[in-house]
Amino acid sequence: MSRRRGTPLLRGALTTSRAADAPVQISVRTASLADQLLQLGQLMQQGLLTEEEYAAAKADLLT
């Protein structure tokens, strides 16, 4: 059986995109980093966070 030059060996073969198989990551940020840091500072000033809690939360945001 001869094959014409440029003719696919398997006609009608399905092709899949690797990108379609990759997991989708969705990142939703409702407040900027600066806004979050300001909010933490306000919570500490109001006495709702201790200095240690503030420092830990701030470190988490900055890493």
Image (spheres, helix red, strand yellow):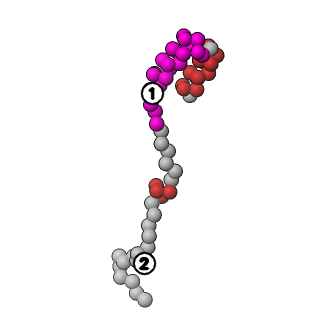
Indicate which disc, 2 or 1, sits on the residue closer to the N terminus. 2
Q: What residue appears at the point 50 percent right and 44 percent down from the top-left corner?
A: 25
Residue situated furthest right in the rendering: 52
Identify the image quadrant of the C terminus.
top right
Q: Position of residue 57 (x, y in %)?
A: 58, 23
**Residue nearer the viewer, 13 or 50:** 50
Residue type at mark 2: give it: Leu
Q: Position of residue 56 (x, y in %)?
A: 62, 21
* Secondary element at image label 1: loop
Query: Which percent across, then down, holds residue 39?
Result: 49, 19
Q: Give the percent coordinates (x, y) of residue 49.
A: 60, 16
Q: Residue at x 54, y 25 (%)?
A: 62
Above or below: residue 60 compared with residue 11: above
> Which residue position is annotated with label 1?
31
Give neighbour class at mark 2: few <14, some 14-19, many 20+ (Cα, 10 Å): few
Residue at disc 2, secondary structure: loop
Q: Is residue 23 left or right of residue 2?
A: right
Q: Amino acid at mark 1?
A: Ala
| 45 inside magenta stretch | yes
The disc at residue 44 is none
For disc 1, the neighbor class at 10 Å (few under 14, some 14 to 19, many from 20) is few
Q: From which residue to which does the magenta span run?
A: 28-49
From this viewpoint, which residue is outermost toward the bottom? 1
Give the CA distance from mark 2 to mark 1.
Answer: 54 Å
Quadrant that contains the N terminus: bottom left
Residue at image mark 2: 9
